[in-house]
Image (cartoon, helix red, strand yellow):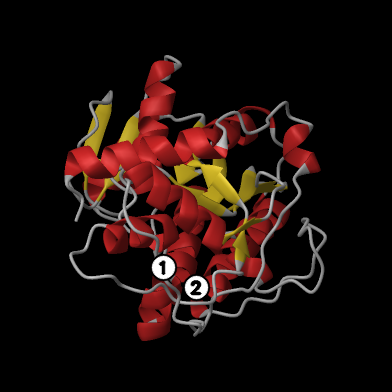
Amino acid sequence: MGAAGFIGSHLCRYLQRRGSDVLGIDRREIGEKIGVAIRGEFPQPQVCEAIAAHRAQQIYLLAGTSSVAVSLADPLADLAGNGRDTLSFLEWMRQQEIRATVVFVSSAAVYGDPAELPATIATPVHPISPYGISKLAGELYMRLYASLHALDTRVVRPFSIYGPRLRKQVVFDMLVKLHQPEPAALFGTGQETRDFVYVDDLCAALVRVGDAGSPAGIYNVCSGRETSIATIAERLSAFARRPPLAFTGKSRPGDPLRWRGDCPELRALGWQPSVPLDDALRLTVDWFTSANAI
């Protein structure tokens, strides 16, 4: 579910390449050529009927909201998208006795601004945005239904995901500003850090969790490397052959200062990131240039 989104569309491609029978669902038109594509949203009848008929072994929940800024502007809608709708889907699964493995794509935003790095699944969760809270609510419902009703739910916490076709967040924001006629500054000082993961590596992680993860398990998806925003800006500027960007010196509400994760639980399943940072940034710049994404 969420097959037309950034991660969902890449995941559909990844699953198709490995020969999986894919059912994609989204309220928007699904551009990917997959086995079955349903336009709609849960709990519309055509969506419920398709899920029940497909008898899926794995369900990847990618629907919902995915923006700190949007959550700050409309926290109630954000909670509905990530909390209420997740609970509604789990309750429907329980009532229909659907026993597929459910992989819930949460976010490292549940950690907020960790006091110590790297953030592990043992790090206390302390969201600093409505988005982080709503994702945590979805996680808690996943764990509750695993405990109360023996549903096979698994939670994935991606860190800073980027790649072609993502039209928001820091890498895209930098590319837009780099290609504007007049110089534009980025929020922050540039010394803020993130743990960047290319979208293809995320898709591989999601499928590893779906195939081999533990019921009620929680998995960080991260590179284990802390990279400053200034470093990303410098590399994108060089790859795009554009003048460097400046910074405003002012941070945005809800944005953490530093992020670096660790994921021994995911490595134990045989996963590790395979796309080097520079290669992934070049691929993203090439997509942006060819797509005229501004």
The three-letter code of the residue at mark 1 reads Ser
Q: Which residue is depicted at the point 42% across and 71% down?
A: 246
Residues at discs 2 and 1 in contact (Cβ within 8 Å): yes
Pick the quarter of the image with the C terminus.
bottom left
- Determine crowd level at label 1: few under 14, some 14-19, many 20+ residues with C-alpha closer than 10 A: some
- What mark, if any, has residue 67 been given in the picture? 1
Going by the numbered disc 2, the residue's amino acid type is Tyr
Residue at position x 62%, y 46% from top?
A: 153
Residue 159 point in image, percent of width and height: 59, 54
Give the left or right position of residue 167, taking residue 126 as reference.
Answer: left
Give above or below for 260 relative to 277. Answer: below
Label 2 to label 1: alpha-carbon separation: 7 Å
* Residue 1 located left or right of residue 96: left
Label 2: state its secondary structure. Answer: helix
Mark 2, other Cα within 10 Å: few <14 / some 14–19 / many ≥20: many
Residue 191 point in image, percent of width and height: 61, 69
- Picture residue at 51% right of the left edge, 79% below the top: 130
Name the side, left or right, on which 169 lies relative to 221.
left
Q: Which residue is mark 2?
A: 131
Q: Quadrant of residue 208?
A: top right
Q: Secondary structure at mark 1?
A: loop
